[in-house]
Each structure stands twice: as C-alpha cells, then as structure tokens.
Image (spheres, rainbow, N blue to C red):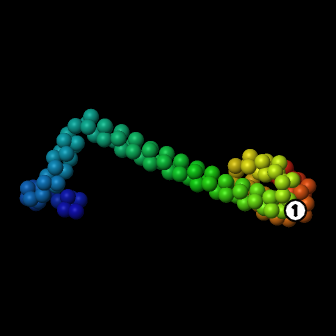
Amino acid sequence: MLYLNNLEGKEMEAIAMENPGIKKALTIEQIFLKDKKERRLYELREKAYRDELSALAGARAEGEARGEARGRQEAICKYLEARFGDASLGLQEKVRQYNELEKLDMLINKIYTAASLEEAGAIINGI
C-alpha cells in the first residue's frame, strides 16, 4: 500500500530500503519508464491478457446459453414423452434441433396448451 500511495523522493527511498518488494517495484518502474520497447511489450501483454479475459467471458456466456437451451429442450421433450408417449419421438427430435433460447421459450410457453399430438406438432413446426 505504501508503494501505491505515490510517495516520492527520500520518503519512498527510505521505505524501499526497508522493504525488498517495494525496492523491486521501484527498480522495475524505473526500467519501464526509460525503455519504450519494454513499455510497448508490457502494453501488448496487457492487451493480450484483456483479450483472453474477454474471450473467456464470451465462451462462458455461450456455454451458459447452450446449457439453458439444453434444459428447455429437455423440459419440452419430457413433457411430450409424458403426454404423448413414444408417438412424440419425432417431435422430440425436432425440438432438439432448436438451439435459440427465444424460440425454445416461445415453444415452451405454447406447447402446454396442445390438446393432441397433432396440435403439438403444429406448434413445434410453426416456431
């Protein structure tokens, strides 16, 4: 914390002499500020790190969306199985082809109103 308080001059030198971690940080900072190449390398490393974090966050979000879609698919398929038995296997396969959450949400909201397998098929094919 002492290093981050932006102390300068003799005050910082005195602290650095007592603390090897601060002394090392000051040495690295001095090298960094004098060497444009080092600074550029640092900036590139930082950019790569931020890009990687962004890519990981995107992948995580995509994975969560896939998981949500999979959950909705399974809920719809279980409903079809419970309601219409093996006769609904073809519709279940069609439901498993939908990966968009928006479509699956519309489907899950409408499918429970189907009174027959034919109506369920019309709802699924109409999405």
Q: Position of residue 117 (x, y in %)?
A: 89, 57
Q: Is residue 27 above or below residue 22?
A: above
Nearer the observer, 115 or 101 = 115
Q: Position of residue 3 (x, y in %)?
A: 20, 58
- Identify which residue is drawn at 48% across, 48% down: 56
Give the image quarter of residue 111. bottom right
For this orientation, the residue located farthest to the front is: 86
Q: Is residue 87 at least partly visible in the picture?
A: yes
Residue under the point 62% across and 54% down: 67
Q: Where is residue 61 drawn, in percent x and y?
A: 56, 52
Residue toward you, 16 or 82: 82
Work out whether residue 47 or residue 116 is closer to the camera in this orientation and state it.
116
User: Looking at the picture, which amino acid does disc 1 mark?
Assistant: Ala
Residue placed furthest toward the top: 37
In this picture, residue 32 sits left or right of residue 82: left
Residue density around tag 1, few if under 14, some if 14–19, many if 20 or more, within 10 Å: some
Residue at the spot x=58%, y=54% of the render? 64
Q: Is residue 21 found left or right of 59 in the rendered image? A: left
Residue at image x 74%, y 46%?
97
Question: Total label count?
Answer: 1
State whether residue 106 appears in this view.
no
Residue toward you, 102 or 44: 102
Query: Left or right: where does residue 119 sit relative to residue 24?
Result: right
Percent position of residue 50, x then y:
42, 46
According to the picture, the residue beneath numbered tag 1 turns out to be: 114
Question: On the rendered structure, is 62 left or right of 85?
Answer: left
Q: Secondary structure at mark 1?
A: loop
Q: Locate the N terminus and report the quarter of the image it occupies.
A: bottom left
